Amino acid sequence: MLLRLNTSPRVPSFSGPMALAAVLLEMGASTHRAAPSGLRVDSADRSSLNFYIVQGKADNTTLKLGAWGACTRLRNTTDVNGDTVWCTSKLSSYEYYFLPNQTIGGVNNFPRGEGREKLSEATILGLDADEDQRIFVIGKSATSVYWVHVIAAITSVLCVLSLIFPPRYFGTETSRLFALQKSGIITILLALVSFVLALVTFIVEIVVAIPAKNRLDAIDGISAELGNVQWFTLPCFILMIPAILSVLLRSTQQHEYTDL
């Protein structure tokens, strides 16, 4: 028995962790947004508020900045007659500014509506005020990089899908695609790309979130904290490490696929 590079990914030690990582990445890519569709949120959509970049808490309102938009909501909803959550539509990139309370002795709060009043996206994002009156928190260049998470999720799903199809689906035994699928090279390359993208996604999400959190935290009366989306991404690339190593470094005898 010789130690060699085993390019067969069709083993449970690879497929199991990669499938779990793909599911986690896909869940994060589809739900790590603060804003569901529409400017008003019903109770069925509020689960979308569970994944976010940064959260800010004011006297009576809470702000959540997600990858695809922003939401504000009341912290105390006792005796409130009307909406308690106000969101932007889904945005692939956006910028957010905080507009300080301009009243004498006023307390800083995030935008909120009264009763059934809708809030415009410009109001929620602090864009309907002069530049010298608002405080920059996060820009379009920062929120747009969350597309890396989507790409990582797609790549990991393709990696798992490549395990499902036997080589005969890609042509005859003399075709190049047949040989590549039989060897497992395509699957392993997809796994390596997924790992790199997942790692980059985690780093990017941390790099984007920390400055935004610090800017919010520096505002009088606002308490900010990091969101949970980056910690949701962390286990994804960690799971991929033993999966990839289990294939590349596993000592085994020469084998052939049996599903040709």
Image (cartoon, rainbow, N blue to C red):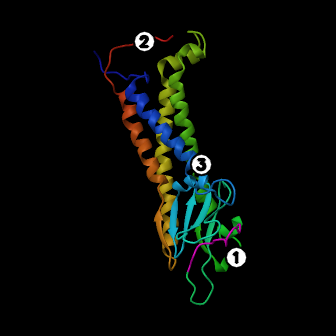
The type of residue carrying mark 3 is Trp
Q: Are marks 2 and 3 in contact (CB under 8 Å)?
A: no
Q: Is residue 24 visible?
A: yes
- Residue assigned mark 1: 129
Of helix, strand and loop, which one carries label 3?
Answer: helix
Q: Nearer the viewer, residue 212 or 115?
A: 115
Q: Nearer the viewer, residue 89 or 168?
A: 89
Q: Distance between the Cα atoms at labels 2 and 3?
A: 39 Å
Label whose residue precedes the other's in the sequence (3 or 1): 1
Q: Which segment is the magenta one?
A: 108-118
Q: Is residue 51 visible?
A: no
Q: Nearer the viewer, residue 179 or 102?
A: 102
Of helix, strand and loop, which one carries label 1?
Answer: loop
Q: Is residue 38 left or right of residue 248?
A: right
- Residue assigned mark 2: 256
Residue 136: name its quadrant: bottom right
Q: Distance between the Cα atoms at labels 2 and 1?
A: 67 Å
Residue 6: name its quadrant: top left
Magenta span has 12?
no
220 relative to 145, above or below: below
Image quarter hosting the N terminus: top left
- Residue assigned mark 3: 147
Q: Around disc 2, counting alpha carbons within 10 Å, would you say few (fewer than 14), some (14 to 19), or many (20 or more)?
A: few
